[in-house]
Image (cartoon, rainbow, N blue to C red):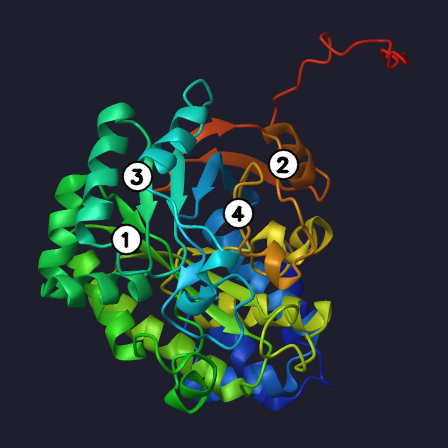
Amino acid sequence: MNATEKLDFLIQDKNLDIELRHIAQKVLHGERVSFDEGVILYEHGELGYLGVLANYIREKKHGDYTYFNRNFHIEPTNVCVYDCKFCAYSRLIKEREQGWEMDVAGMMDIVRKYDDEPVTEVHITGGVVPKQNLDFYADFFRQCKSHRPDLHIKGLTPVEYYYIFKKAKMNHYDGLKYLQECGLDSMPGGGAEIFHPEIREKIAGDKCTAEQWLDIHEQAHSLGMRTNATMLYGHIEEFWHRVDHMERLRQLQDRAGGFQAFIPLKFRNQGHQMSHVPEVSVVEDLRNYAIARIYMDNFDHIKAYWAMISRDTAQLSLAFGVDDIDGTLDDTTKIYSMAGAEEQHPAMSTRQLVELIKQVDRHPIERDTLYKVVTDYKDVVFDDTNKPNYYSLPVIE
């Protein structure tokens, strides 16, 4: 059965709860799911049911297309003025000897490392320190664009921008406009965590508020920038907090329309102040992806970070609403691994990503940051002729 036939079959099931049947009918007819219905999906939606709904929406929007890009990360520092309880990555200012703080020259050295590689995006995010201020990033963006104009700069989250702009005494719009003129192209979606203050104040009480996070994205959208959005799930929040988080994003997308992808981020419990909180199961991961796809009807893409959830779970997620599994990374990020992600040295070649997608009968598409097709890999056969038919042995002296 195809996705539509599976949904029709589900709706005809006489044993299906009446509320769940009503939601399935709304999905079939392209109608928006309400806040209360979002909570019902979390509380009563079984994995198989949610997968049918989410895959129907996914295939209606994208067919079998599954997107990835060739990117690398620059993390300018892991020293931070903020004390997020769930963060294994950052080191407080008083612990800065345990971390790193890069200068612009060091960041440009990383960019130059990829001069002969067909990467399309540099993703920049990290901690927040006073010396990495507005002028620091303006200088880097200018140098990066001057050196490689074709490289898309996806840089910094509202957590970083809020601090930088406040220190520079600039409002969000003017600060973003200035950095856009320096070379900034788009924004990643980090720092959202959980918006509701009941949870946010407990896990990240000293960083920007939900309202400030949303405003910075709205100002970016008004400048024509595209951005992403995340949600950190699976810790001390309740299901309705997740729905509240998605509802705020959905409302902003209705107003401004600049979000490209929604990215649920799994809470990992190693190396930080919330290590006592157990992680949710893979089943809950897949349920969460599916509900995100059902609820976020005005977001084009649902993304799963393969480096965070494992390659196997990323493959499974493609049947639960996900259509993007991020990029090659090339072992350039420590944010996931330091929190206990499945991939401790996250790097995949283009070939590996393509094969990962094809193994579950999806259609691999290399995209750029704005989802323009770079290469359609559906019928690409990789050349094995250069593989050696022998392996050299080590010389023992």
Q: Residue at the spot x=50%, y=69% of the render?
A: 292
Residue 129, given in percent of the width and then of the height, sits at 32, 60
Query: Which badge, 4 or 3, is on the more N-terminal residue?
Result: 3
Residue in view at x 53 percent, y 51 percent: 323
Amino acid at dot 2: Met
**x and y percent of residue 71 in the render?**
46, 37
Taking 70 as reference, is 197 left or right?
left
Which amino acid is tagged 4?
Thr
Mark 1 or 2 closer to N-term?
Answer: 1
Q: Mark 4 and 3 residues: CB-CB less than 8 Å, in contact? A: no
Q: Which residue is mark 3?
A: 104
Three-letter code for the amino acid on which mark 3 is drawn: Val
Mark 1 or mark 2, which is nearer to you?
Answer: 1
* Label 3: which secondary element: helix
Asked if residue 203 is positioned above or below residue 283 in the image, the reply reads: below
Nearer-N-terminus badge (4/1): 1
Dot 3, how many residues are within 10 Å of its Cα: few (below 14), some (14-19), or many (20+)? some
Select label 3 or label 2 by which is in front.
3
Q: Which mark is residue 132?
A: 1
Q: Nearer the viewer, mark 4 or mark 3?
A: 3
Residue 124 x, y percent position in the rendering: 38, 47
User: Does residue 3 sit above or below 385 in this rendering?
Assistant: below
Q: Is residue 93 left or right of residue 89?
A: left
Q: Nearer the viewer, residue 146 or 49?
A: 146
Label 3 – label 2 distance at C-alpha = 27 Å
Q: Tag 1's secondary structure? A: loop
Cα gap from disc 4 to disc 3, whole angstroms: 18 Å
Q: Residues within 10 Å of mark 4 (few under 14, many from 20)?
A: many
CA separation, marks 4 and 2? 13 Å
Which residue lies at the image location 39% right of the left edge and 30% below the top edge?
Answer: 109
Disc number for residue 333: 4
Q: What residue did someone put label 2 on?
A: 348
